[in-house]
Image: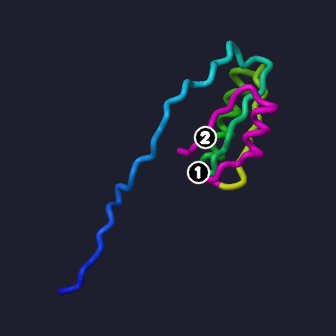
Amino acid sequence: MSQLITVHDPRGYPPKVAGKRLAARPETLNGKTLYLVDCLFDNSEVFMDQLKDWFAKNLPAVNTKIIKPRESWVDDADMRAKIEADGSAAILGVGL
Protein backbone atom coordinates (compact mmCIF):
# COMPACT_ATOMS: atom_id res chain seq x y z
CA MET A 1 0.00 0.00 0.00
CA SER A 2 2.65 2.49 -0.91
CA GLN A 3 0.43 4.18 -3.55
CA LEU A 4 -0.82 7.69 -3.00
CA ILE A 5 -4.51 8.41 -3.23
CA THR A 6 -6.30 11.68 -3.81
CA VAL A 7 -9.20 12.60 -1.56
CA HIS A 8 -11.68 15.23 -2.75
CA ASP A 9 -13.63 17.33 -0.28
CA PRO A 10 -17.35 16.68 -1.10
CA ARG A 11 -18.42 19.94 0.51
CA GLY A 12 -17.19 22.00 -2.43
CA TYR A 13 -17.25 25.76 -2.26
CA PRO A 14 -20.46 27.67 -1.57
CA PRO A 15 -21.39 30.22 -4.23
CA LYS A 16 -21.41 33.90 -3.39
CA VAL A 17 -25.02 34.92 -2.84
CA ALA A 18 -26.47 38.41 -2.86
CA GLY A 19 -29.78 38.87 -1.06
CA LYS A 20 -32.76 40.26 -2.96
CA ARG A 21 -36.09 41.65 -1.83
CA LEU A 22 -39.15 39.49 -2.30
CA ALA A 23 -41.49 40.38 -5.15
CA ALA A 24 -44.24 42.83 -4.29
CA ARG A 25 -47.40 41.06 -3.15
CA PRO A 26 -50.50 41.95 -5.17
CA GLU A 27 -53.43 43.30 -3.18
CA THR A 28 -55.73 40.70 -4.75
CA LEU A 29 -55.61 37.85 -7.24
CA ASN A 30 -59.24 38.34 -8.29
CA GLY A 31 -59.44 38.73 -12.05
CA LYS A 32 -55.74 37.94 -12.43
CA THR A 33 -53.86 34.99 -13.89
CA LEU A 34 -51.95 32.76 -11.49
CA TYR A 35 -49.52 30.27 -13.02
CA LEU A 36 -49.08 26.97 -11.20
CA VAL A 37 -45.62 25.78 -12.22
CA ASP A 38 -45.23 22.00 -12.22
CA CYS A 39 -41.48 21.68 -11.66
CA LEU A 40 -41.52 18.03 -12.82
CA PHE A 41 -40.71 16.56 -9.40
CA ASP A 42 -42.35 13.33 -8.25
CA ASN A 43 -46.10 13.87 -7.72
CA SER A 44 -45.92 17.60 -8.47
CA GLU A 45 -48.46 17.19 -11.30
CA VAL A 46 -50.96 15.69 -8.84
CA PHE A 47 -50.32 18.54 -6.40
CA MET A 48 -50.76 21.21 -9.09
CA ASP A 49 -54.07 19.61 -10.19
CA GLN A 50 -55.30 19.63 -6.58
CA LEU A 51 -54.19 23.23 -6.13
CA LYS A 52 -55.99 24.26 -9.33
CA ASP A 53 -59.15 22.54 -8.03
CA TRP A 54 -58.79 24.34 -4.69
CA PHE A 55 -58.58 27.73 -6.40
CA ALA A 56 -61.59 26.90 -8.61
CA LYS A 57 -63.65 26.04 -5.51
CA ASN A 58 -62.41 28.71 -3.07
CA LEU A 59 -61.26 31.60 -5.26
CA PRO A 60 -63.14 31.22 -8.56
CA ALA A 61 -62.28 34.78 -9.67
CA VAL A 62 -58.62 33.74 -10.02
CA ASN A 63 -57.67 32.39 -13.45
CA THR A 64 -55.23 29.51 -12.85
CA LYS A 65 -53.06 27.92 -15.52
CA ILE A 66 -50.73 24.96 -15.07
CA ILE A 67 -47.43 25.24 -16.92
CA LYS A 68 -44.35 22.99 -17.08
CA PRO A 69 -40.75 23.69 -18.03
CA ARG A 70 -39.22 21.71 -20.89
CA GLU A 71 -37.10 19.73 -18.44
CA SER A 72 -36.38 19.56 -14.73
CA TRP A 73 -33.42 21.44 -13.18
CA VAL A 74 -32.91 23.55 -16.32
CA ASP A 75 -33.92 27.20 -16.63
CA ASP A 76 -36.70 27.56 -19.22
CA ALA A 77 -36.50 31.15 -20.45
CA ASP A 78 -39.54 30.72 -22.73
CA MET A 79 -41.70 29.55 -19.82
CA ARG A 80 -40.53 32.43 -17.62
CA ALA A 81 -41.26 34.93 -20.42
CA LYS A 82 -44.78 33.53 -20.83
CA ILE A 83 -45.47 33.81 -17.10
CA GLU A 84 -44.09 37.36 -17.02
CA ALA A 85 -46.10 38.44 -20.08
CA ASP A 86 -49.41 36.79 -19.20
CA GLY A 87 -49.40 36.21 -15.44
CA SER A 88 -49.70 38.23 -12.28
CA ALA A 89 -48.17 35.63 -9.96
CA ALA A 90 -46.80 32.10 -9.90
CA ILE A 91 -46.62 29.20 -7.46
CA LEU A 92 -43.82 26.67 -7.92
CA GLY A 93 -44.81 23.09 -7.09
CA VAL A 94 -42.00 20.77 -6.11
CA GLY A 95 -43.92 17.60 -5.30
CA LEU A 96 -44.95 15.74 -2.18
> How many callouts does the rendering have?
2
Q: In this rendered view, identify the residue nearer to me: 10 or 18.
A: 18
Marker disc for residue 94: none
Q: Is residue 28 magenta?
A: no
Residue count near mark 1 (Cα–Cα under 10 Å), binned few <14, some 14–19, many ≥20: few
Residue behind mark 2: 93
Residues marked 1 and 2 touching at CB (< 8 Å): yes
Pick the front one: 55 or 17:
17
Compare marks 1 and 2 and give the one earlier in the sequence: 1
- Residue 57 lies in quadrant: top right
At 76% from the left and 33% from the top, the residue drawn is: 84
Image quadrant occupied by the N terminus: bottom left
> What x and y, as percent, mark residue 25?
63, 18
Residue 52 image point, x, y percent? 70, 34
Give the magenta-colored segment's residue range. Answer: 72-96
* Residue 63 horizontal/vertical position (percent): 78, 27
Q: Secondary structure at mark 2?
A: strand
Picture quarter containing residue 46?
top right
The relative height of residue 46 versus residue 25 in the rendered view (above or below) is below
- Of residues 20 and 57, the one drawn nearer to the viewer in this rendering: 20
Point 62% across, 38% down: residue: 92
Q: What amino acid is labelled 1 in the image? A: Phe
Observer-nearest residue: 44 or 2? Answer: 2
Q: Which residue is mark 1?
A: 41
Mark 2: few/some/many CA within 10 Å (<14, 14-19, 20+): some
C-alpha distance separating marks 1 and 2: 8 Å
Q: Magenta stretch containing residue 89, yes or no?
A: yes
For residue 28, above or below residue 76 = above
